[in-house]
């Protein structure tokens, strides 16, 4: 009995590791680090495209975006999954984003078949980012967003937008191996002059 439990746990660890590696291999949204300290880093992201849908805090939002990259688009093209998957709250509406691979631009990105999925451009900007592991629960994000927010206020860095919740790993990944981030758009150039 103990051997079977050990094998199960070992299998879970092994498959979690494989899923983690698979996520590492996927294209990650490109950025440049312009500042780093013991709590957070400031990243510059260039303009990029996302597939966006309204996030109703259920699996439906993820499914709509996943269907889009699986071929539910005008060219029936399968699109590589990238990281991170992001969620934001803007004007009391929650949105979920899949970032499109860098090979696409506004003209070449396939048009979603589902009218609830939109292709939008995220403008270039600077983002303060705090990275943490563990479960991607709202509680963990709120806790870490508070840490980041307070440190940015202490460092006199102006926040220029809403909190962004970023996740990098499949749900099967063990919490200690997960990469999560909380991000705020910041006025970095203004705050460093």
Image (tube, grey):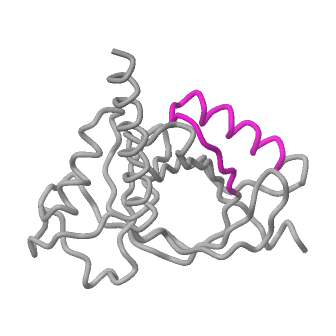
Where on the picture, by quarter, is residue 48?
bottom left
Question: Is 159 situated above or below 178?
Answer: below
Could you say which quadrant of the image residue 71 lies in? bottom left
The quadrant of the rendering that contains the C terminus is bottom right
Q: Main secondary structure of the magenta part?
A: helix
Most distant residue in the top direction: 1
Percent position of residue 62, x then y:
29, 46
Q: In this image, 39 relative to 20: left or right?
A: right
Q: Can you say whether 169 is above or below 47 in the image? A: above
Q: Residue at x 65, y 59 (%)?
A: 185
Task: Please state the horizontal and vertical placement of residue 94, each as a whole percent of the image.
Answer: 42, 41
Name the one closer to the observer, 119 or 178: 178
Identify which residue is drawn at 52% across, 50% down.
166
- Residue 46 covered by magenta stretch: no
Identify the residue shown where x is 19% and y is 60%.
Answer: 68
User: Residue at point 76% right, 55% down?
Assistant: 40
Q: Is 148 one of the magenta-colored residues?
A: yes
Q: Which residues are magenta?
A: 129-152
Residue 21 vertical placement versus 96 (above, below):
below
> In the image, 185: left or right of 156?
left
Please provide percent x and percent y for residue 141. 60, 36
Residue 19 drawn above or below residue 75: above
Query: For this view, does 92 lie left or right of residue 66?
Result: right
Quadrant in which the N terminus appears: top left
């Amino acid at each position: 009995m103990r051997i079977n439990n050990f094998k199960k746990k070992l299998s879970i660890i092994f498959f979690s590791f494989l899923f983690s590696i698979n996520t590492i291999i996927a294209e990650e949204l490109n950025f440049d680090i312009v500042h780093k300290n013991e709590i957070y880093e400031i990243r510059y992201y260039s303009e990029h495209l996302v597939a966006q849908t309204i996030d109703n805090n259920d699996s439906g939002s993820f499914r709509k975006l996943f269907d889009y990259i699986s071929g539910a688009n005008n060219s029936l093209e399968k699109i590589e999954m990238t990281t991170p998957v992001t969620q934001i709250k803007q004007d009391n509406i929650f949105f979920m984003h899949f970032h499109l691979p860098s090979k696409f631009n506004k003209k070449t990105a396939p048009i979603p078949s589902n009218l609830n999925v939109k292709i939008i451009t995220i403008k270039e900007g600077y983002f303060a980012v705090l990275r943490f592991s563990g479960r991607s629960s709202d509680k963990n994000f709120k806790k870490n967003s508070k840490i980041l927010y307070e440190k940015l206020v202490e460092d006199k860095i102006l926040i220029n937008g809403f909190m962004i919740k970023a996740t990098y790993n499949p749900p099967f990944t063990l919490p200690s191996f997960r990469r999560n981030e909380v991000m705020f758009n910041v006025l970095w150039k203004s705050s460093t002059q």
